[in-house]
Amino acid sequence: MQEFISTVNGWIWSPALVYLCLGAGLFFSVITRFVQVRQFPEMLRLLFKPKKGDVGISSFQALAVALANRVGMGNIAGVAAAIGFGGPGAVFWMWVVAFLGASTAYVESTLAQIYKVEQDGEYRGGPAYYFNKFFGGTAGKIYGFILAVSLIVSCGVLLPGVQANGVANAVVMIVGEGSMVETAFGTVGMNKLIALLFILVVLALIIFGGINRIAGFTQIVVPFMALGYIVMALLIVFMNIDQLPGIIGMIVGDAFNAQAGMGAAIGWGVKRGIYSNEAGQGSGPHAAGAAEVEHPAQQGLVQAFSVYVDTLFVCSATAFMILITGQYNIQGTLPEGQFILQNIAADTVISGPAFTQLAVSSVFGSFGTAFVAVAIFFFAFTTIIAYYYIAETNVAYLSRQMKSAWALFLVKVLVMAAVAYGAVNSSGYIWEIGDIGMGLTAWLNIVGIIMVFLMARPTINALKDYEEQRKAGVEHYTFDPKKLGIRNATFWEDRINNKR
């Protein structure tokens, strides 16, 4: 099974997908005239704009849910893997994919707002909804169905295991394995099983409460956990500030003449960058579609900012801690056990959080080990919650014409089963399963949003409309899709009609 998973992963994550992600980000950056730079101050302003009305969640809550999805194991273990297999230059390519991916995040999240629907007392949006509405007819239904199924499989089955594995291992970092117990999945430590039980109970309490409980939980936990992690990284950098110029030079230099080979640096940097910030993957638009805003472009800008927070802030924090303390090995494309550069023990697992743990503990001792474990716990746990919400939204899409209570209950059970499976299996195997889920939806979503642009320009027209209203100094923004030549944006059409 593991060999089969590795083969499929290689097919999906061929160089074609790596360059598709980079190319799409560059394309949308140029088309939007680098909206991720021009509108940066507006992104910050919109974060704290209060929500109007009883339906939906605020822009900040949508940002928190999206960040819960983006900020996870990829920020700690993913960065370590990128450095271990791609060299320090992989960090540069993570930055590149974040900068370019912010424009992709704007496009997909604005599409989610334009084509969102009000369903069962909540706003719903995402790739299945916007492709169905944009393409229309049989083509729209088929593409929407394919996206919905792929996202349910990806976020409900394949991806939660990576995060659950990180949460369970974080507990083991602090309290140890405990006595060993024979299970259907092999020998597992008792402490890991106890941790799994606790995770499942807390997860059930949250996901059975709906989007408002999910948003309420994430808006409290996510900002504090990200800020605390970044502060820890800044402390380590300031304690070694004399090394910072050399570290930055090494990152940039190895990006084009990498010790691990330029191809490995680009491949691992882009792969782990996308796994972390998920720009273009189609997961972020679900939270974007749930927000209550005056204009679709507003939430697109907020979600573009979330990519910056994830990669330029949190991932960079991990990278600088690892590189500045020298707690890493570089295997590159060499066989397992052989290293281009070896600074630490050869048996240190590259595809896990070990580099990060060693980096922090080398400065702060046992406190550092506990800090990283706690960070992993909250990063990964909130991501599991966000994955559930994405799976739920796509189940709601498929069952929108019928009573969906049984289907929503089933997806809750499915996610909890995936969490249990991922928690007790080996990390390398689980990461490859997660990569398949991420790559599958990235292919479908990026190709789809490029087709949307080639057929029409809804997100570009929306951005132009918003910027014109902002320049005119309007007090309340409006969005009239028919005036902009955007078809089938029924939610906004109804809102305009009701105001007249």
Image: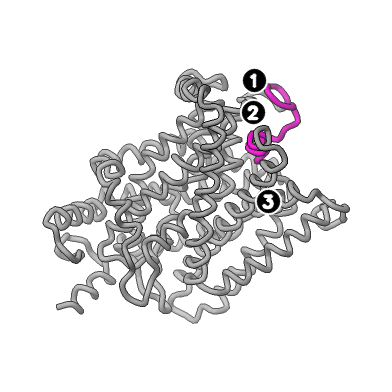
Q: Is residue 367 left or right of residue 251?
A: right
| Residue 65, x across and y down, in percent | 47, 60
- Gap in angstroms between the C-alphas marked 3 and 1: 28 Å
The percent position of residue 155, horizontal first and vertical second, equals 55, 57
- Counting from the top left corner in percent of width and height, residue 151 is at 50, 58
Q: Which residue is mark 2?
A: 328
What residue sits right under mark 1 in the picture? 341
Gap between marks 3 and 2 measured at Cα: 21 Å
Placement of the C terminus among the 4 image quadrants: bottom left
Q: Nearer the viewer, residue 127 or 322?
A: 322
Q: Is residue 333 visible?
A: yes
Q: Is residue 443 visible?
A: no
Return the residue found at the far bottom.
Answer: 403
Q: Which residues are magenta?
A: 337-360
Q: Main secondary structure of the magenta part?
A: loop
Nearer to us: label 2 or label 1? 2
Note whether 500 is above or below 111 in the view shown: below
Q: Earlier in the sequence, mark 3 or mark 2?
A: 3
Q: Amino acid at mark 3?
A: Asn
How many marks are shown on the rendered structure?
3
State the SS at label 1. strand
Residue occupying the point 50% across, 62% down: 220
Q: How is the image coloured?
A: one colour
Question: Which label number is shown at residue 165?
Answer: 3
- Asked if the residue under mark 1 is in contact with the one under mark 2, i.e. CB atoms within 8 Å, the reply is yes
